Amino acid sequence: MNRRFALLIVLSMVLGVGVGWACNQFLSPGQAEQAASNLSIITDLFLRLIKMIIAPLVFTTLVAGIAHMEDAAAVGRIGAKTMGWFIGASIVSLLIGLMMVHLLQPGAGLHMQTAAAANAPAMASTDAFTLRGFITHLVPTSIVDAMAKNEILQIVVFSLFVGTAIAALDNKAPAILLLVEQGAQIMLKVTEFVMKMAPLAIFAALASTIATQGMSMLAVYGKFVLGFYATMGLLWLVLFAAAFVVLGKRAVPLFGVIRTPALLAFSTASSEAAYPRILDALPKVGVRRRIVSFVLPLGYSFNLDGSMLYCTFATIFITQAHGVHLTVQQQIFMLLLLMVTSKGIAGVPRASLVVIMATLTYFGLPEAWIALVLGVDHLLDMGRSATNVVGNSVAAAVVAKWEGELDDIEDETPDAGGEPAKLPA
């Protein structure tokens, strides 16, 4: 199924480029604009479907996740170290993405502002960007109002309170918890249905963009994709360096055994698909299973390094392409916003699109601008999924080392089959 879906994605990209080129070459500028407008109906419909599922999806998945985190309190020391690593890794990922997108400038000079000048501000709104405004905006006056407006940050805060309250109750409110868990399962299934439209939306997004912008957009997309993978490579180097500092030479066999899970995540564009493989692989390099079983579930909720890198990189790329300038203060707020909102939709297909849309909306920018990256999102999803696997594997090994639960029974060099060899007695 994954291979078939990936093939559909590739075919939709090729077809979208072909149709867009034909419209650009054989239609008058007015006709090409009209064709792009008609094609964008499909993209708009897809984006509306995503908006439709944001509020219930974030609420149910985050409440269910927080409600089951009582183990983190029971082993507070391990939980604190784990969350400390996650927060540090998230900050590093966001900063690397921000630094590299400014260095590479993949969207500079595109001047797409003119195509949407009717409702596109030249400068992001600064009305909400005071310390008082930001802090008070975190807490909703009404959760119903927050959900109606898709205020994802407020939904996250409310969900944290509800999930923590359920976890603190002696009986864990089983009826409510069961309802939330079933709601989360339903919303994940709805999300799966919505994402089946992704090939059609990708076709429409590419076709409409190239119809109006021409084949020169392919060079822009190429620069964007290559720039992201170069940035991701830098993050991998940072993760390896951090692992080497903490683990020493044990970092080498660690990266050896997670090679297969990372490749699986890359090929399927799903870090969840690699989860069973990581659970099996990490104990082979001495990470005790109780640490793996504790850290990985938390990591899949709170430590998506590749996704956070992409959110920063893609958001700034979109603003560059539309000629919108974010001040230093706004970029700091953007990092804080991404840090919080990205924690609410872990494990959701195309979760980064939801986070980026919420970020654009928070800055008063048109959420439809996300269509610019929609056409190549799958290519980038492959890389960020693999990066999520690497980041969580390193986190588990580091926490095991800090806790003295990294066993010394394995050799430091995996054999040809990826399996570590035992040390001689």
Image: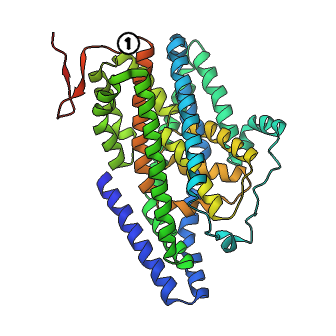
Q: How is the image coloured?
A: rainbow
Residue 72: x percent and y percent?
52, 17
Instruction: From this view, report whether residue 56 is shown above or below residue 21.
Output: above
Residue denoted by label 1: 405
Figure quadrant of residue 340? top right
Camera-nearest residue between 292 and 415: 415
Report whether 118 appears left or right of 395. right
Residue 279: x percent and y percent?
33, 27
Instruction: From this view, report whether residue 28 is shown above or below residue 164.
Output: below
Q: Residues within 10 Å of mark 1 (few under 14, many from 20)?
A: some
Residue visible at 42% across and 27% down? Answer: 243
Quarter holding the C terminus is top left
Exactly how many numbered labels are in the figure? 1
Q: Is residue 242 visible?
A: yes
Q: Is residue 368 visible?
A: no
Report whether 149 appears left or right of 61. right
Instruction: From this view, report whether residue 309 is shown above or below residue 113.
Output: above
Instruction: From this view, report whether residue 283 is shown above or below residue 196.
Output: above
Residue at disc 1, secondary structure: loop
Residue visible at 48% across and 52% down? Answer: 228
Camera-nearest residue between 270 and 379: 379
Amino acid at the residue labelled 1 = Glu
Residue visible at 60% across and 81% down? Answer: 33
Camera-nearest residue between 20 and 250: 250
Report whether 185 appears left or right of 91. left
Residue 239: x percent and y percent?
45, 34
Residue 411: x percent and y percent?
23, 20
